[in-house]
Amino acid sequence: MAYRLSPASRLLIASAALCASVVAVVTAQRPTLLDNPAIAYSKSAPTDAIARLQQQLDSGAATLEFDEARGYLPSVLKHLEVSTASQGLVFSRTSLQVSHIAPWSPRALYFNDDVYVGYVKDGPIMEIASVDDKLGAVFYTLSQEKTERPTFQRETTTCLMCHNSAEVTGGVPGLIVRSMYPDRYGYSISSVGNGVTTDQTPIEQRWGGWYVTGTMGPQKHAGNILAPVLVHDVDNVKGYMARVDLGAGSQVTDLSDRFDTDVYLTPHSDIVALLVLAHQATVHNLITRAGYDARIGRPLDGDIDALVQALFFAKEAPFQAPVKGTTAFAEEFAAQGPRDAKGRSLRDLDLTTRMFRYPLSYLIYSDQFDALPVTVKTQVYAKIRSALDGEGTIATLANLSAEDRTAIREILTETKADFAEATAAKP
C-alpha cells in the first residue's frame, strides 16, 4: 500500500534530515533532564495555552476560521489574544521552513506573554512555541491546509534538535532569539555578537537577520541589512565581517521598498516589540531551568542568581537615545497591568535610557513563575527582598537606584500577594 505524506509531514522529515548534524549533541543532553522521571517531557500532557485551545476545538467550544490568504493565522492569533502589533519579521533562514524564507519573504513572529506563533508566506505549517507551567517551551505545528478539524501537532525531537541546547537554552526546552549577518538569500555568513540575543546584548549587535522598524536616535543596530554576496563566496569570514557596517540599516520606519508588506498582517517589525521579545524569551528559559533543577533535585544556587539578575534587568544594555516604535505595541503592552494604587505597573516602559520604568520583570506575574516549586520561589523572593533592601550580594544589581527599589517594593506588595506575604514574614 502506498502512503501519501502531507506537505507538513514532508517538511518535517526534510528538516530533520537537514538538522541531522546536531542530533548527536542534543541526544547526549536530553536524558539528563527531559527524560528524568520528574520531568518526563515527551510523555507528559501539556496544559499550556495551545493544549487548552485544542481541547476547545475538540469539544466544539471553539472553531478556527480559514483565511484564503493567510490560512489559520488570523484566527489563531485571535483565540490566543496575540496582538498583530507584536509582529517581528525574520528574513534569515533559521526556521523549519527554510525553503520558504528569504529577504523578500520574511517569516513573521507574533507573541504575547506565553505564546509565540511563527508564520511563513506559502508555508505548509504554522510553528508555535507555548510556555507550559512545568514543561517549559512546548512546540507545535498546525497545517495550513483547510480542514474540518484543525489539529495542533505536538513536536518534540524535530524542534528540540535546536531548541534544547546547553549553550543557547540552558539545556532545557527553550526559546531562541538570534542575531546573524545573512547573505542576499538569507543564509547566515556569521553570528553577530554571540549569536543569541538577550537584554544584555549591546544594541549594535542585535537583530541581524531581522527587519526592524523604529528609531533610536544615533544608536545603531544590525537589523535590515544583508550581504550583497552569497555565503559560499566569502573565503575569509572574519576579514569580511571586519569590513561590514552592521549599522547601515538603522533608523528604518518603512519596509515597503524591501518586500511586499501587504502579505503580512501589518507592514511593521516594531523595535519595541523586539526589545521585549529578547528579554521575555531569556526569562522564560531561566524559569524553566530553575523549575527543572528543583524537581530533579539538582543544586539551585546558580539558577536562582541567574533568574534574579534577569528579573532585575541586571547588566541591561543602555540606550543611547529614546526608542520609538512604529505600531501601538508599546501602548497595548503597558495597558495590561496590573497596577498599584498610584497607577504604576511593572509593564510601564521607559524607552529613554532603558527598557522599563521599574526594572523588575513583568513575568513575575506569569503562570509559569507562579507554578515554580516552593523551594525556588522562596529563594527568589528572598533575593528580591534583599536587593530591594540594598542588602543583596549580587553585585550586578547596581542598576537599581533607591527610587527604583522603593517603587518596585510598593508595586509588588500591592499587586503580588505571595510576595507581600514573604516580605511580611521577614524577621
Image: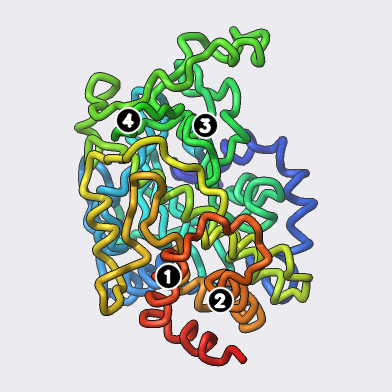
Q: Earlier in the sequence, mark 3 or mark 2?
A: 3
**Residue drawn 56% across the image and 92% down it:** 425
Q: Residues within 10 Å of mark 4 (few under 14, many from 20)?
A: some
Viewer can see residue 2: no
Q: Residues within 10 Å of mark 3 (few under 14, many from 20)?
A: many
Q: Which numbered marker is on residue 385? A: 2
Mark 1 and mark 4 in contact (Cβ < 8 Å)? no
Label 1: which secondary element? helix
Q: Nearer the viewer, residue 100 or 237?
A: 237
Label 4: which secondary element? loop
Q: Amino acid at mark 2?
A: Arg
**What residue sits right under mark 1 in the picture?**
408
Mark 1 and mark 2 in contact (Cβ < 8 Å)? no
Q: Position of residue 298 (x, y in %)?
A: 78, 71
Q: Earlier in the sequence, mark 1 or mark 3?
A: 3
Q: Which corner quadrant holds the C terminus?
A: bottom right
Mark 2 and mark 3 in contact (Cβ < 8 Å)? no
**What residue sits right under mark 4 in the picture?**
217
Q: Amino acid at mark 4?
A: Gly
For the residues marked 3 and 2, what is the alpha-carbon distance in whole angstroms? 33 Å
Q: Amino acid at mark 1?
A: Ile
Where 40 falls versus 158 (above or below)? below
Q: Position of residue 426 (x, y in %)?
A: 59, 89
Residue reaching furthest to the front:
402
**What residue sits right under mark 3 in the picture?**
205
How many badges with numbers are in the image? 4
For the residues marked 1 and 3, what is the alpha-carbon distance in whole angstroms? 30 Å
Q: Amino acid at mark 3?
A: Gln
